[in-house]
Amino acid sequence: MKIIQLTDIHLPEGGEDTMGIDIPANFSKVLEAIEREGPDHLVLTGDLCYHAGSRKVYEVIKLKLDIMGIPYSLLSGNHDDPEVLADVFNIEHLLVGEELFYKRKLGGKTALFLETSRGFVSDEQLAWLDKELSQLRGTALIFMHHPPLMAGVPHMDNNYALQNMEEVQQLLFSYPKMVNVFCGHYHVDKILCLNNLVVHITPSVYFQIDWRVPGFRIDHKRPAYRIIELLKGGGLRSSVVYV
Ligand SMILES: [Fe+2]
């Protein structure tokens, strides 16, 4: 099972100041590269929109994905509106109140998709996650927008980290096997490990952040995506590709 994750597209409606970056062109180039990879499934881990959730942007992205014809799953980032997103992508049935969190089988494995568009994992969702983890066997596979560990990216850790990180960590640490989390939000390529938790942060389709400096600085403007291969026997391989 070959999954491709793309994250933090930040597609503008038009007219926004995008720091000279042609985001629609980035998105098209990434989709062309993905098509050549021939994945079985795509996962979009949030921040589809430039600044705020936009029906128009979701419609553009949906059209492009539907033309490509590869099955896909989505979740919401802090620059999304989960209800509008669910409406446009015809997944309203997955909404739990105003939140979009759900599970889905990918290559025979249960993947959990979390909702952190308000910057935290709600109590209701933590209870759901606890129940779902108790029913899993083997390595857990989770997609979410915010990393659940501090990442050594000062601009993001200090200003935009997951608010109830410790609560989420406690729950994930209590799972008896390894937990693989694939996320975005930080616009960097990093792997973070603590106890049984491995967090893969995938770089953005927009621009990448320099994690070596205390403030905000762009590292580079090459758009990226991540390949995740789920192997028979339970292992996985993962690589970031810059376009
Ligand atoms: Fe984000």
Image (cartoon, rainbow, N blue to C red):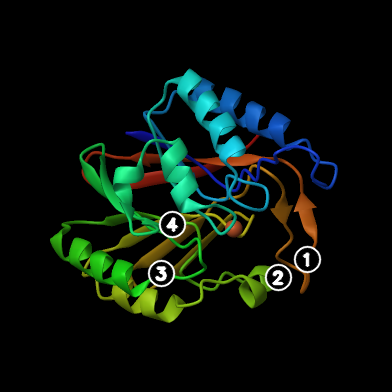
- Marks 3/1: CA distance? 26 Å
Q: What's the residue type where badge 3 is placed?
A: Val
Residues at discs 4 and 1 in contact (Cβ within 8 Å): no
Residue closest to the eye, 25 or 238: 25
Q: What's the residue type where badge 1 is placed?
A: Phe
Residue at the (36%, 58%) spot, across then down: 180
Disc on res. 216: 1
- Residue 103 at x, y percent in the picture: 27, 50
Q: Earlier in the sequence, mark 2 or mark 3?
A: 3
- Label 2, secondary structure: give it: helix
Q: Earlier in the sequence, mark 2 or mark 1?
A: 2
Q: Which residue is mark 4?
A: 144
Disc on res. 155: 2
Residues at discs 4 and 3 in contact (Cβ within 8 Å): yes
Does residue 21 lie above or below 63 as drawn? below
- Label 4, secondary structure: give it: loop
Q: Within 8 Å: ligand 1 and the Cβ of disc 3? A: no
Q: Nearer the viewer, mark 3 or mark 1?
A: 3
Crowding at mark 4 (Cα within 10 Å: few <14, some 14-19, many 20+): many
Q: Which residue is mark 3?
A: 121
Which quarter of the rendering shows the C terminus?
top right
- Label 1, secondary structure: give it: loop
- Residue 132 at x, y percent in the picture: 20, 61
Q: Within 8 Å: ligand 1 and the Cβ of disc 2? A: no
- Marks 4/3: CA distance? 10 Å
Horizontal relation, residue 208 to residue 86: left or right = right
Crowding at mark 3 (Cα within 10 Å: few <14, some 14-19, many 20+): many
**Residue 96 seen anywhere in this rendered image of the structure:** yes
Q: Earlier in the sequence, mark 3 or mark 1?
A: 3
